[in-house]
């Protein structure tokens, strides 16, 4: 004698996710990223360790190694991400106004206590490590290039610049002075009115190209 229960197939066992396929928690990833910046600012790249990063992030070393296989790859990944984020493109209606706003945002970023420690340290490390040099150059270049290109295009549309401006020379002219003052010379404080004067001089220089 058969019954309905006997005719029904046995329940399937619940499948377990294969080892190593667990979803990486985004909050843990962000905690590690923040810890990297803090650790770089505190001890520099050479003395930075996976153990120190994990301790600062409040996670185990395994959590770090599941995402990055070494501190070099971790730092390169985070530095590369900065280029993707970029800076907001100003839209003030004039070339000088756009440059002034760009300089204000960039100056605050470069003079942030963490950034002011990390960037010079990574530059020094880049002199010894070609991988870091390549990524750092790309990051700094792309981060400014995307914004500068939009500023130049908008100025050309308004008739403030000609259509044949040398883009590379323009980028050097836009980015060089503030970077020199904030990162290389590392002035404790910018002179009063410096950013406005720099924006005005840069705008005139671009029009002369």
Image (cartoon, rainbow, N blue to C red):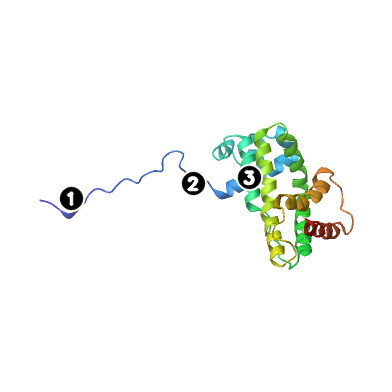
Residue appearing at x 75%, y 65% in the figure:
160
Residue appearing at x 12%, y 51% in the figure:
2
Residue appearing at x 72%, y 61% in the figure:
162
Give the residue pinned by disc 2.
23
Give the residue pinned by disc 1.
6
Give the residue pinned by disc 3.
80
Residue 110 placed where, x, y %? 77, 50
Residue 171 shows which numbered tag?
Answer: none
Disc 3 and disc 2 in contact, CB within 8 angstroms: no
In this view, 85 is above or below 162: above
Residue 164 placed where, x, y %? 70, 57
What SS does tag 1 mark?
Answer: helix
Residue 143 placed where, x, y %? 68, 51
Quadrant of image for the C terminus: bottom right
Neighbor class of circle 2 (other Cα within 10 Å; few <14, some 14-19, many 20+) is: few
Alpha carbon of mark 1 to alpha carbon of mark 2: how far?
A: 39 Å
- Quadrant of the rendered structure where residue 204 is? bottom right
Sequence-first tag of 3 and 2:
2
Residue appearing at x 71%, y 59% in the figure:
152
Residue 79 placed where, x, y %? 66, 44
Alpha carbon of mark 3 to alpha carbon of mark 1: how far?
A: 61 Å
Sequence-first tag of 1 and 2:
1
Q: Which of 18 and 195 is in front in this view?
A: 195
Compared across the picture, whether 197 is left or right of 97 comes to right
User: Mark 3 or mark 2, which is nearer to you?
Assistant: 3
User: Mark 1 or mark 2, which is nearer to you?
Assistant: 2
In this view, 61 is above or below 103: above
Q: Nearer the viewer, residue 196 or 111?
A: 196
Compared across the picture, whether 40 is left or right of 69 comes to right
């Amino acid at each position: 004698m058969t019954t309905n229960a006997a005719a029904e197939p046995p329940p399937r066992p619940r499948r377990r996710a294969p080892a190593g396929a667990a979803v990486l928690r985004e909050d843990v990833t962000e905690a590690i990223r923040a810890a990297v910046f803090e650790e770089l600012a505190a001890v520099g790249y050479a003395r930075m360790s996976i153990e120190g990063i994990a301790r600062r992030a409040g996670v185990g070393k395994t959590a770090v190694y599941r995402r990055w296989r070494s501190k070099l790859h971790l730092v390169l990944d985070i530095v590369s991400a900065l280029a993707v984020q970029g800076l907001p493109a100003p839209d003030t209606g004039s070339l000088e106004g756009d440059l002034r706003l760009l300089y204000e945002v960039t100056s605050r970023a470069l003079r942030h206590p963490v950034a002011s420690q990390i960037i010079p340290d990574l530059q020094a490390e880049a002199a010894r490590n070609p991988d870091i040099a390549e990524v750092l150059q790309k990051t700094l270049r792309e981060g400014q290039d995307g914004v500068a290109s939009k500023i130049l295009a908008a100025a050309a549309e308004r008739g403030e610049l000609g259509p044949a401006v040398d883009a590379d020379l323009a980028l050097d002219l836009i980015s060089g002075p503030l970077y020199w003052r904030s990162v290389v010379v590392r002035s404790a404080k910018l002179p009063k009115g410096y950013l406005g004067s720099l924006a005005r001089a840069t705008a005139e220089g671009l029009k002369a190209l």
